[in-house]
Image (spheres, rainbow, N blue to C red):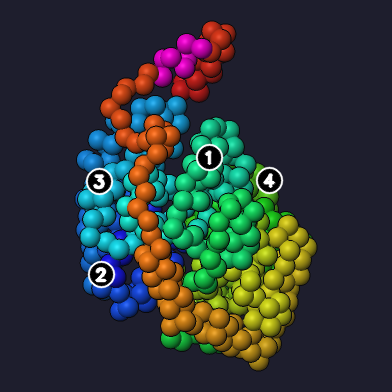
Amino acid sequence: MKILFVLPEYYPHSGGGISTYYLHYIKALKPHVQLIKVIVGSGYTQSNEKYNLDGVNIEYLEPGLYQNQLKNFSKFDLIPEYKKNVAAAWAMWEQVNRGIGFDIIECTDFGLGFIPWLVNHKIPVITRLHGSSGQIEMFEPNLKEGLSGDLCRYTELNFLQHADKLITHSTTNQLFWKSILSKEITLIPPVFSVYADAVPYEKKEPFGIVCARIQQWKGPDILCKAIQELAERDVLIKWYGKDTNYDNINSKSTQLSKAFSAIWGIKIVVHNPIDHTSLQLIQQKARYAIIPSTWDMYNFTGLEYMSAGTILICSDGAGVSELIEDGINGFRYSREDHLALASCIKKVQALSKDEYNTMVTNARNTLTNELSTLILIEANLLIYKKAKAQFISAEANDYQVASFQPSRTEYQIDSLLDKQPLKKLITYLLKRIRKKL
């Protein structure tokens, strides 16, 4: 079987959840199939670079193809983020010659890479639900100002139901999509390779760690409130992650510094993202790790912490929390309950060496027992075989072609602006000029 993976991120330029997932999965899958190829790209990721990792060819979306496809979607000029991802999807389809020669196309829901493969449905398409663009916009308040999120959700509702198979690895996400799409959603836990050794208790250092972007739904506010409750305790949290926009004026980190001046930057020390190998060493040294997300489709750092021998405190808002038995192989708390999070931190700090080591052993055993690579690869191969055996080629319908097929027809944004009240436009122009000045 020959499989083409169309991904928005992958080796070597991303440490995000999708990249982490596929680094483990593709390595484990490769011995069981004839050929794997990966193309990586999105509206924000293009490059002329090509790589070979463990016998798998990886190529990035070529910038020239991407720029040419941007010209075909001028009708989306009003929504640039959406336009970029749609253009990138078609450019990748063009770059890999429409997938000719492959038995299966696997896309992700994030980044809209599935569009051309389902408009021109000539090869079975597996879409893996990692947390879509539309979902993320729902949980990030500052993103709800424009049409991009609504358009992403419209596109996801339109297309995902036509994928040959939909797979996710979180029960919560499975239930989410079952309530929206009239289609079976297959639940297969992620493949994950456990570290050979966990760092012993004696070599642990007295700090906690968070590895996440600094944004609302990753839960920094909840963590700050929890640390406030621990004012009398010696608490140090190292947060590794990229800062994000909060309100188009302040970044989220700046907002947190203002709202929690005695906590953010003091007891929660912010670090820029670092390469994955260096981050693994810090994950192993940490006494405990925290996933404070109020929503997170899964969060693969949870698996990394458990494997590294670092006790995990996890919000039930993250899908990985399904693996946590509270007080047995980690600690789990209700996503908005900062008092419960503070209590969990106290419990970790109070563990004896034997209690700590027992919990670490239990966590690593959970990964071995629940995420058996052989069983999970067999489950995925079965899905691929069914998709291929049941596949019926479909012609693009007129609605999809009209909405999503590349077109050289030029759409002028002026026609939209002409319909706006002059007063509204003048007010906007003055505000924009002041902002620029």
385, 166: nearer the viewer: 385
Q: Nearer the viewer, mark 1 or mark 4?
A: 1
Earlier in the chain: of badge 2 and badge 3, it is 2
Question: Image quadrant of residue 344?
Answer: bottom right
SS type, badge 2 = strand
Q: Which residues make up the magenta segment?
A: 413-419
Q: How many other residues sit within 10 Å of disc 1, few (<14), some (14-19) or many (≥20)?
A: few
- Amino acid at circle 2: Leu
**Residue drawn at x 39%, y 31% as measured from the top left:** 402
Q: Nearer the viewer, mark 4 or mark 2?
A: 2
Q: Position of residue 314 (x, y in %)?
A: 64, 68
Q: Which residue is mark 2?
A: 35
Q: Position of residue 164 (x, y in %)?
A: 44, 58
SS type, badge 1 = helix
Q: Position of residue 89 (x, y in %)?
A: 35, 45
- Amino acid at circle 4: Ala
SS type, badge 3 = helix
**Residue drawn at x 46%, y 75% as measured from the top left:** 379
Q: Which mark, by number, is residue 94? A: 3
Q: Check the image and name the residue furthest to the top.
A: 422
Tell me whether the residue at label 2 lies in contact with that at label 3, contact meaning CB atoms closer than 8 angstroms. Answer: no
Q: Which residue is mark 4?
A: 259
Is 266 left, or right, of 103 in this rendering? right
| 3D distance between C-alphas at marks 3 and 1 | 24 Å
Disc tally is 4
230, 409: nearer the viewer: 409
